[in-house]
Each structure stands twice: as structure tokens, then as C-alpha cells.
Image (cartoon, rainbow, N blue to C red):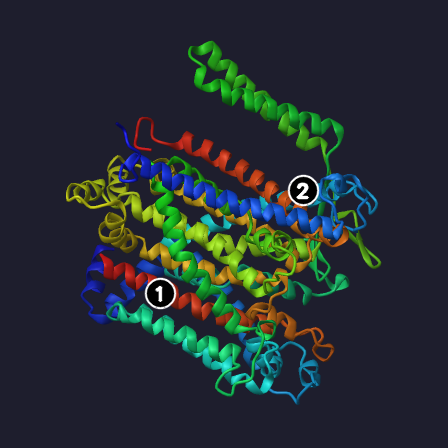
Amino acid sequence: MTLVLYKSRDQGRLGRMSGWVRANFFAGVASGLTTILLSLVALAVLTRFLDWSVLNAVWTAPPGDSSPCRAVHDGACWALVGEKYRFMLFATYPYEAQWRPATACVLLIGLYVISAIPACWRRGLLLVWVAGLVAVAVLMWGGVAGLSFVPQDKWGGLPVTLLLSTFGILAAFPAGILVALGRQATALPAIRIMCIGYIELIRGVPLVSLLFMASFVFPLFLPQGIDIDKLLRAQLALILFSAAYIAEVVRGGLQSVPSGQVEGAMALGLRYWRIQMLIILPQALRNALPPLVSTAISIFKSTSLVLVVGIFDLLSSGKASIVDPAWQGFGLEMFITISLIYFIFCFSMSRYSKYIERRLV
Amino acid sequence: MNRFSLQDPHNRRIAWQMLAVGTVATLAGWFFWNAIGNFDARRAGFGLDFLLRPANIPIGETLIDYAPGDANYRALLVGLLNTVLVAAFGILLATILGTVLGVARLSGNYVASRLAAAYVEFVRNVPLLAHLFVIYLVLQRLPSLRTALSVGNLAFLSNRGLVIPAINLGFSSMTLFAGAAALLVTGMTMRPFTSGPVSRAGVKGCLAVAFVCTMVGLASMTITLPVLEGRAFVGGRTISPELTALVLGLTIYYASFIAEIVRSGILSVPKGQWEAAAALGLRRSWTLRLVVLPQALRLMIPPVTNQYLDLAKMTSLAIAIGYPDLVAVANSIITDTGRAIECVAIIMGAFLLVNLSISTFMNWLNLRVAVVGGAK
């Protein structure tokens, strides 16, 4: 037995290969059985899925005609996505002007990408963001430079998802930092209690109930005649929600900064805000960067909940696009496509979080 | 001589707090004032009196008796029970699946660890709502009742939902279970205070009698298997596609997060613990059970609690696929009666209560597994 092992180790590449295979696939009876069983199950599921999604799939169909899909017994109907993708991506935005939200999406994604590169982290980035957001606003609303005006209730699809998450994170970030600082301020008990109450209340209730609050209750709290747009109200609810979660992540970062840092800064004669801005927050936010990215991912995913109050984000536009008598009974394909779009965004963010984590150590 | 000055740190602190409280109070007061004005203008009224009025909404699935025409509070109670049902099953199943996946990711078997990793990466990067829609549509594409997929003739899966054997608890077995539970609780609470052979034997006796009660209770209850008769199943309990999709979605989604927690919990136990246990001659499975898991559990409980709380809150997505949970019922009542503030407040209060119960239980569990005298 030992002899065999000794030999196989010295057999060069092939021997090492077989050793690796034995160690990772057939380390024992149980391991061998697991390998065989799991491989068979995975293979069966994969072939079944390939059959459905590729081999038996219908890729094209004449406009408004689902008969090619109905003719196939067990195959995906990607023709549905081909016909409805414009509605899924841009919903009710005027059809001939849909290059505008498309460009806005590209601009927003460009902003995310350059903000993710550590070499770009300098003051100029703020100006780039301001310019980018102004351009997005001009593209989406129009009304200037010969672009026709498109009111907010016509917006939908991917740009709404991206805007809700962008502002949900951008506005909630400073608010979250303030709340986290308030929660840590032991010398200010009244502020501390309010911050704790806010965080615990928001984290204790579902986002759906906050969205209900924004859509049913909030209008009652405003004077008559003042009407805030539905999209803006949902955005406010999202910001309120995200700020509480960001505050808890920032608090974790604040707690990771040794107390000697505050004492040292106080010994230098610095006041509270200068201590926080110059000494504590830079270290705390650096430590909290990986969990902040995870929070950003979950905020991005949670924007899909605006569906329950009837706002057309990517997911609810997709859901609305398949409500068509001609395509009755199809729709799975649409949701798989949407899932893939969400996956691309979230997966790149989570990979990025891993990269940042490695860079920081 | 003491002149009031804002340069004094003490005064500054008080001024800041007054400013903050004042701002919040002003805002709240303004909202309140507007709300009163709006109520007068709409003549909608405000109060909890609507709870006693008859509800005009039909509810498909109920755990307690309910019919349209019953009071609104009963409809809300039906919704709350449905929410608790979904949350309980979701937490239970997600924990089981998540633990299996987390251990599989660490397994030496390449296929198992890769498959688990692929599962986790894919599932947690897609919103829960998208999962729910996909699962719901897949369930609708299942075979019809006549050709339902059967699991050993015990359970049947079709596009009308899942049919499982019905368990009929008679009065006698209910009493026996209640007795067993009482004995178990007594035995477990007395255990820390027992010393000496007599009282220890008493605790053991308690547990033994509880075990016997449970067994007899299990033996005396009846199970009816579902049988397809004509166009419907008779004898079993039907779980609607909506409930199946919701529980499946929550399980699949949260299992991916729990798997990561289990994995990092086990990984954070120092390697030396494995080696020391091996040096003592403990088997691998014993090492995992007696040495590694107790230490990993301590690290896992706080993040797992967060996932449980999240799962309980996300049961509110039931409204998107049409399962009558608390939020969906409250939503119907809002459309019916127009009492938005009251209903949203009831939703929030109920979820705070559910979350408080979960976190209280998990904190108690955490205290039990914490190191005695160790760092908190």
C-alpha cells in the first residue's frame, strides 16, 4: 500500500493528478459515493435545464404571435424576452425616446465603475458625480436642449432600479454616518436615545411596511395641496431604511478604532468634529468598507420591493410586460432574464468587495 | 458670577440636544397637525373602532375559522398566524438547508464543495422577490392534479400545490403532548439547581416520563393519507402553491446566507483545536460535535439571529404572490376601510413583536452557549 503511494507520487504529472483526484473525489467510501451521487444529480439537472433553455428553446417569433412557443412541448420561449425586452428595460418611457434612459443607465454604470477604482478616489470624483447626475437628470426629464419633457410617472425599468439604489445609497450614507455618531455620543443622551430608537424601529419592521407608510400614510401628514410624487416617496422610504442599516455598519467601524485615537486627538486640542472628520471616520470607514459593500448589495436587491406599491422598477416592469393575453402562460423566461441582470450587478459588487478586502489588509 | 456661555462644553451639549429634540418634535407636531386637518377634510375618522366592524374580504387560507363578515380584527389575526406559520417553517428549513450547505462547502469532497459554493453565489445575488416569481411560475408548470408527482404515495405535488398526509391530533394525544412539554420544561429548568443523587434522579424521572408521554401521544394520533378521488384529493392536507412558493423561496434564499455563516463559524475555530482533539484520540465526527461546533455555535448565533429577523420581515413579500399574510390582509382592509395609519401601525407593531420574540429567544440561547466568565 505504501509502495503504491510512494510510486504514484513519483510518477510525475499523471501521478500527482491521480493523487489529487483521489484526495478530492474518492478519499473514502463515503466520499466516493457522494461524488458519484452528486455528479449524477447535477448532471441530470444540468442536461434537463440545457434541454429546456437551449436545445428545445424557441428564439424568435413573429411580433405578437406566440404560436411557435406553443408548438414546442418542453422548451423555453426566449422569443417572449425578445419581444418584451424594451418594456422590461424602460417600461412606459416614450418608445422613440428610449435612447435617453439607455444612455442614462450607461452613464450611471460608468459612474459606479470609476468610483470603484481606488486610483480615482480623489476630490475630482465628486465633480464627476455631480456632472454625471446632472446629465442623467437632463436625459431622464428632458425639457431642455430640444429634448421633450418626460414626467416621472412615465419612467420605469432599469433606470428606476439604478436611480433608486444610487440615491438610496448616496443619501443614506451621510445620514447613516450621522446616526452612527449620534448613537455613539454618550455625552448627549437625548440624541443617543433618538438614534437608537430610529435604528431599532426601522430595523424591526419590514421594508414593505415602510413603503406602505410612504404610499398610504405620508400624504396624510402633508398639508392639503402639497403632493409629493410617488417615486420620490418610495425613494424617501428607501433612504430612511438604508440609513439605519448603514448606521449599524458604520458603528461597527467606529468601534474598531482604538479609543487611544480619540484620546490622542483630544490631547492635541482638537474639537469633536475635527476629531471625527480627520482621525476617526477615515479609519472607521476604511475598516467598514467590505460590510458597506455588502449593505450596498442588499440595498440594490431591496429596491425590487417597490413592486408592492406599484412603482415600475426592473422587476415590476418585467412582471407587467408579460401581462399580455397573446403570451398567456409564459413568463418564467422573463423572470430568469431579470434574475440574470440582478445577478450581474450583485455578483460584480460581491467580487469587488473581496478585492477591496484583500487590498486593505 | 456664572455667566451663561455657549463656549462651555456642558452648555453646548445641552444646546445641541435641545436643538435635536426640538427639530424632531416640531416635525412630528407639524405632521400631526396636518393629519388632523386631513381627517376633518376627508371625514375618514381615526381610531381603532373599525377593528370590530365586519370585514368584507375573503381569505383563502386560514389556520383558525374565518368567514367574510367576521370582524376585521379576526381577519388581521388570521393574517398574523399565517405570517408566523411562514416565518417558523422558513426559519426551520433554512437552518437545516443552510447548515448542510455550509458544511458541504468545507467538505474535502470537491464536487460537494463546488456545488455548494455555486449555489450560494448564485442564490444570494438575486433578489428574493425574483426567486419567488421564478419558483411560483415553476410550480404552476407542474403536472395537473390527475398526473401529480407522487412521493411514495404519501405526498403529491401538482400545479394546485402540495398535498401531504393530515395529522389528526385527538384530545388524548394533545393532552399527552402538553403534559410531556410541561415535564420537559420542569426537568430542564430544575437541572442547574440539582445536586445530590436523589434530586438528580428526580430530573431524570421527569425526562423519562416526558419521553413516555410523547411516545404514547405519537401512537394515539391518527394520520390520514391523501387519496385522489375524481378531481380532488381526499384525506390529506393541501398546501397552496402560494404558501409552497413562499416557504421554498425564503428557505432557498436564506439558506445561502446561513451557509456562509456556518462556514465562517467553523473556519474561525483555530486549527489547533482539531489537532489537539486528534492527539487526544477523538474521532473526526466526535471532534466536530464535541470540540468544534460548540465553539463555532457561539460565533454563529448573533449573525444567524440577524438572518432569522430578516426572514421574518421578508415574509411580507407574500403580498406579491397572493398569500394572505398579515401585510396582505391589512392591505385589503386599507382598501376596504381607508384606515391606512391604523393598519400600517398594526403591521409595524406586530412585526416588532415577532422580531422581539425571536431575538429574546436567540439571546437566551446565546447566553446558554456563552463561555462562563469569558469575554462577552
Q: In the image, is residue B179 above or below residue B313?
A: above
Q: Mark 2 lies on which chain?
A: B
Residue B153 at x, y percent in the picture: 70, 53
Quick one: A72 or B337, which is closer to the camera?
A: B337
Q: Is residue B245 visible?
A: yes
Quick one: A82 or B215, which is closer to the camera?
A: A82
Residue drawn at x 64%, y 62% is: B136
Residue drawn at x 59%, y 60% is: B132
Residue B299 at x, y percent in the picture: 36, 41
Q: In the image, is residue A191 above or below residue A14?
A: above
In the rendered structure, find residue A206 and report the number of the disc placed on it.
Answer: none
Among all residues in the image, which is located at the extreme bottom?
A62
Among all residues in the image, which is located at the extreme left?
A268
Quickly name the residue at label 1.
A351
Give amino acid for label 1.
Arg
Give amino acid for label 2.
Leu
Quickly name the residue at label 2.
B81
Q: Judge the density around disc 1: few (<14), some (14-19), many (≥20) Cα neighbours within 10 Å.
A: few
Q: In which quarter of the image is the C terminus of chain A?
A: bottom left
Quick one: B270 or A157, which is closer to the camera?
A: A157
Residue A109 at x, y percent in the picture: 41, 74
Secondary structure under tag 2 reads: helix
Q: In which quarter of the image is the N terminus of chain A?
A: bottom left
